[in-house]
Amino acid sequence: MEIDNLVVRYGEKAAVDGLSLTVTGGTVTSVLGPNGAGKTTTVETCEGFRRPDSGKVRVLGLDPIADHDELMPRIGVMLQDGGAWSGVRALEMLKYVATLHSHPLDLDTLVDRLDLGTCGKTPYRRLSGGQKQRLSLALAIVGRPEIAFLDEPTTGLDPHGRREIWQLIRDLRDDGVTVVLTTHAMDEAEQLSDQVHVMSAGKLIASGTPDTLTEHGTKSLEDVYLALTAPPAREQR
Ligand SMILES: Nc1ncnc2c1ncn2[C@@H]1O[C@H](COP(=O)(O)OP(=O)(O)OP(=O)(O)O)[C@@H](O)[C@H]1O
């Protein structure tokens, strides 16, 4: 995936402001940054849901807007708000989305893996936060995507749930899937990522492997991130 000098505006405001980065196939790449840094806008542009004001984006060699119909079956999208109708039962939603793909994953295995069996008949609006997260992830990967965009995939999950999702993400990578994730969990980014990009105010402010960014583990990624994104000191009166 290639992003070249991308600018995306909401009115006058540039949410993404001249961003360039490359994501190598078959890796896990994390995009980090403070609230409002432009991560979701960047990812939504790569998914073809937002039009660049300038610059270029290529995903699997395709233009996310011009080649949208060709690209969509090849990518998986995990949305922060789940993307399911409020009354639909968890399993119904998963079965429905599976029918949209030509070679979906085996549903029993997926339900088992994401521990959705006990809440399969629960309407979406009644699912717990963690169950919604796990359903959203199942919806993102059921179609065997070549690239999975995962927006804060473990927010709201308990510690066991987080580690299960981490293992699932590693398994996706081992199967050759490219994973692009946004997260505020620095331990997650450090554990999972081959490459980390840090954004602030729409711009890229740092990139590297967890090993290089943490100076071979002599610092934590959280400390590195905090130093990179520290707000300017207030003026002393
Ligand atoms: N639909 C919209 N209309 C207007 N402004 C928007 C819209 N979506 C996002 N923004 C603004 O664009 C900026 C970047 O938002 P974005 O959601 O991309 O950030 P983010 O890095 O994903 O943040 P978070 O970590 O809080 O999810 C923010 O200032 C936000 O208020």
Image (cartoon, rainbow, N blue to C red):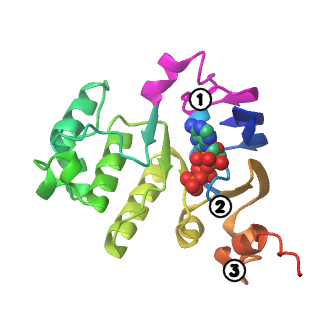
Residue under numbered circle 1: 50
Residues at marks 3 and 2, CA–CA distance in whole angstroms: 22 Å
Q: Is residue 105 left or right of residue 23?
A: left
Q: Is residue 8 left or right of residue 122?
A: right
Name which residue lies at 60% across and 34% down: 46
Quarter of the figure that contains the N terminus: top right
Residue under numbered circle 3: 217
Name which residue lies at 15% across and 42% down: 89
How many numbered marks appear?
A: 3
| The magenta segment | 46-74
Tell me, yes or no, whether the highlighted magenta stretch contains residue 68.
Answer: yes
Mark 2 Cβ and ligand 1 under 8 Å apart: yes
Residue under numbered circle 2: 34
Tell me, yes or no, whether the highlighted magenta stretch contains residue 123.
Answer: no
Residues at marks 1 and 3, CA–CA distance in whole angstroms: 37 Å
Q: Is residue 164 visible?
A: yes
Tag 2: amino acid: Pro
Q: Could you tell me which secondary element the residue under label 2 belongs to?
A: loop
